[in-house]
Amino acid sequence: EVQLVESGGGLVQPGGSLKLSCAASGFTFSDHYMDWVRQAPGKGLEWVGRIRKKANSYTTEYAASVKGRFTISRDDSKNSLYLQMNNLKTEDTAIYYCTRDGYSFDYWGQGTLVTVSS
Amino acid sequence: DIQMTQSPSSLSASVGDRVTITCRASQGISGWLAWYQQKPEKAPKSLIYAASNLQSGVPSRFSGSGSGTDFTLTISSLQPEDFATYYCQQYNNYPFTFGPGTKVDIK
């Protein structure tokens, strides 16, 4: 069974940093691109970024709203995906989901809440 | 960026009704469109990929069609567990973008 479990969310002040993790199981993690998607409270879904697999040099893509502040990485030996978030803004407050990039975003984690507030 | 619109933004329907949701892209995306279902306080669930392909385990009452800029999601006979919000998403161009959602509730 495919499972994606996010962790690392919490309350952080504007300008602060936070690193989210996503533990994957039930599939060959290294074979898949992975993405982060977020959802602000009561709002719709927003794609954050993608990381490709080793065969594609682990290259990344980002939404303009986070480019230069967020970094996606992965550790295939640990079946883990990461999202390093720096210089956080109040508008980054959201539930952050990790998703498997298969046939579209075919599996999603349960999400982790990030609240940016003073 | 490609803008995705959905109509209607919400609808009320009864169990057994046929429901159709429309999604439009601001430019052509070939068939690179997905549909997701989200229930309150839950993560989205993938329903359809590549415009018309059902994800494994998704009931056959769900179907998708379209290409280019215009797409539809149809639920042939609405069931109690289908009351949720539905999102379309294009993955033809970066940044990937989602529609604003269509909330389906009970009439």
Image: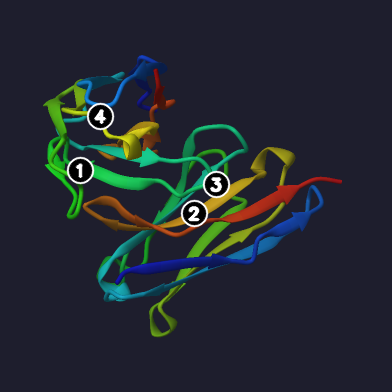
Q: Is residue A8 above or below residue A86?
A: below
Which residue lies under the disc numbered 3?
A67
Q: Amino acid at mark 1?
A: Tyr
Scheme of image coloration: rainbow
Displayed quadrant of residue B72: top left
| Mark 4 chain | B
Mark 4 / mark 1, whichever is N-terminal = 1
Q: In percent of the image, x 21 and y 29: which residue is there?
A: B29
Q: Residues within 10 Å of mark 3 (few under 14, many from 20)?
A: few
Label 1 sits on residue: B49
Question: How far apart in space, not on screen, are marks 1 and 2 (Cα)?
Answer: 19 Å
Relative image position of residue A74 (x, y in whole percent): 45, 71
Tell which residue pokes out farthest to the bottom in this image.
A77
Q: Amino acid at mark 2?
A: Tyr
Would you name the residue on which mark 4 appears? B78
Q: Residue at x 58, y 54 (%)?
A: A70
Q: CA distance from mark 2 to mark 3?
A: 18 Å
Tags 3 and 1 both on a single chain? no
Up/down of A115 relative to B33, above or below: below
